[in-house]
Image: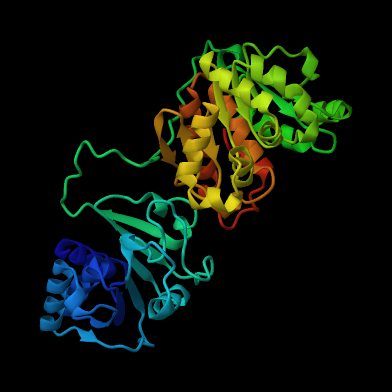
């Protein structure tokens, strides 16, 4: 606790070195003890510190009781009323001990923190955030003030900081292991993806056949744009040849004229047995008829959008999907939360409140790699620890970006990556484009996103 408090105090000074008045909201447990330690150090270092505290000395854990005594002896100022003139706040109310929505005085304090227009530092996790899931239990979730937010994660990184509501609640995440070695036999809940694989140099003697074929099946009448976006993403993602099997045959001539780099074909003319197939983008109900052949024969398969909705309603298609794993055929599913909910027979809220668990359950159920899209996209494998992707932002919250991701995964599969590698690498690269997009540039739409993948 003493190490945690000192680490929090040091980070507070680094974030806001010229803060004049620091408010520290301390809870009744060990997280509050961390805050009391931080208050003592900041007071010693000449800062004006005000502590509001919900604890009672008689009921404190032993370490927190000692920290309370140290803060008192140091002369830290305690008061019951919230300060009004603070220019930095530290949340030390709940940490990982939160199991239900805060209420009463604590809820009032948290609401004040959430609406503060000054920088905020959360110790370990933002109070009210479930550390394992990223579920936000606070009233008024999603209404945080537009102010810098930081979280100092202690001992280990918490999955909930990087998925669901966690990314908005936590802001910039910092880490301190406090000098404690984590036991080697402690299995991780998830891995945080650190980077994506660099594109290896291509031999001068290579040709279009060296980098695989991607066949995109989708684009029902009035929806050809989705399939075109997936096809362009596959092309810019490095596939050697991309065939656009548009279900709206009336659009073939127009798409060929507008995008001559794509090979527009009728679906019946394509052989999927040696190719990577991306199926479902803009497929509507028309894609259902193609799914039995696609699932049964495609060497490598990415299923997205309307293909997933069709599978969720058809037990026979679900059976064909499971058989692919027994044949050693790579399969990646790319659902958004509603599509995942349909496949699992759950509500969207249930999926979002347990994203890691839902992605892993769906991967096991379908014997496929699953990319559960959203803030902190989760990539799950039936037999591996899931990966959380930290890249991406709200620029991707626009129509067509999911089609681009499906096409990019297809390109990486076609070039020889395993299903899990292709999914992790594509998700990271997809989000990195949005992160690097200039704030003063044009709005990032799906077409620009696809063109920026190369």
* Residue 351 makes an appearance in the image: yes
Task: Give the x, y percent position of residue 123.
Answer: 30, 64
Residue 80 in the figure: left or right of residue 182: right
Residue 98 as seen in the image, left or right of residue 376 = left
Residue 119 placement, left or right of 246:
left
In which quadrant is the C terminus drawn?
top right
Q: Is residue 45 something one can see in this rendering?
A: no
The residue located at (24%, 86%) in the rendering is 78
Picture coordinates of residue 426, whole percent (x, y): 52, 34
Specify the quadrant that holds the N terminus. Answer: bottom left
Q: Above or below — where is 83 with respect to 311?
A: below
Q: Determine which quarter of the picture holds residue 439.
A: bottom right
Taking the spot 43% from the left edge, 31% from the top edge, the residue there is 197
Q: In which quadrant of the rendered view does residue 39 lie? A: bottom left
Q: Is residue 98 left or right of residue 289?
A: left
For this rendering, which residue is in front, 245 or 364? 364
In the depicted structure, whether residue 235 falls above or below residue 17: above
Which colouring convention does the figure follow?
Answer: rainbow
Q: Nearer the viewer, residue 432 or 142?
A: 142
Count the numbered circles shown. Answer: 0
Residue furthest to the right in view is 250
| Residue 267 x %, y % | 78, 19
Q: Nearer the viewer, residue 433 or 248?
A: 248
Provide residue 74's location: percent of width, then percent of height: 12, 81
């Amino acid at each position: 606790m003493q190490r945690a408090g000192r680490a929090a105090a040091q980070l507070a000074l680094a974030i806001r070195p010229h803060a004049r008045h620091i408010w520290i909201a301390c809870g009744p447990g060990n997280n509050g003890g961390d805050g009391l330690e931080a208050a003592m150090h900041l007071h010693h270092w000449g800062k004006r510190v005000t502590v509001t505290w919900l604890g009672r000395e008689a009921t404190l854990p032993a370490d927190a009781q000692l920290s309370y005594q140290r803060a008192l002896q140091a002369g830290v100022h305690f008061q019951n009323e919230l300060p009004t003139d603070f220019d930095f706040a530290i949340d030390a109310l709940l940490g990982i001990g939160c199991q239900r929505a805060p209420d009463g005085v604590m809820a009032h304090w948290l609401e004040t923190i959430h609406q503060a227009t000054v920088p905020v530092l959360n110790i370990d996790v933002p109070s009210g955030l479930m550390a394992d899931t990223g579920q936000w239990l606070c009233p008024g979730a999603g209404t945080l003030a537009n102010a810098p937010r930081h979280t100092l994660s202690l001992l280990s990184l918490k999955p909930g900081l990087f998925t669901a509501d966690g990314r908005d609640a936590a802001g910039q995440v910092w880490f301190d292991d406090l000098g404690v070695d984590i036991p080697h036999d402690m299995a991780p809940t998830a891995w945080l993806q650190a980077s994506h694989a660099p594109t290896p140099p291509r031999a001068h003697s290579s040709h279009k056949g060296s980098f695989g074929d991607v066949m995109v099946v989708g684009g029902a009448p009035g929806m050809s744009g989705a399939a075109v976006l997936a096809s362009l993403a596959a092309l810019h993602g490095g596939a050697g040849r991309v065939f656009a099997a548009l279900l709206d045959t009336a659009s073939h001539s127009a798409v060929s004229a507008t995008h001559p780099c794509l090979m527009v074909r009728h679906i019946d003319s394509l052989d999927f047995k040696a190719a990577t197939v991306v199926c479902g983008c803009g497929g509507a109900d028309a894609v259902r008829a193609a799914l039995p052949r696609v699932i049964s024969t495609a060497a490598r398969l990415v299923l997205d959008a309307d293909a997933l909705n069709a599978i969720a309603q058809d037990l026979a298609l679900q059976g064909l999907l499971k058989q692919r794993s027994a044949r050693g055929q790579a399969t990646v599913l790319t659902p958004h939360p509603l599509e995942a909910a349909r496949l699992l027979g759950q509500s969207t809220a249930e999926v979002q409140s347990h994203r890691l668990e839902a992605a892993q359950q769906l991967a096991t159920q379908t014997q496929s790699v699953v990319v559960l899209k959203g803030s902190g996209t989760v990539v799950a494998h039936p037999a591996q620890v899931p990966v959380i992707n930290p890249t991406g932002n709200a620029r991707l919250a626009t129509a067509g970006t999911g089609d681009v991701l499906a096409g990019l995964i297809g390109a990486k599969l076609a070039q020889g990556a395993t299903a899990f590698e292709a999914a992790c690498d594509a998700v990271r690269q997809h989000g990195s484009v949005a992160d690097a997009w200039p704030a003063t540039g044009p709005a990032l739409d799906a077409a620009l996103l696809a063109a920026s993948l190369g």
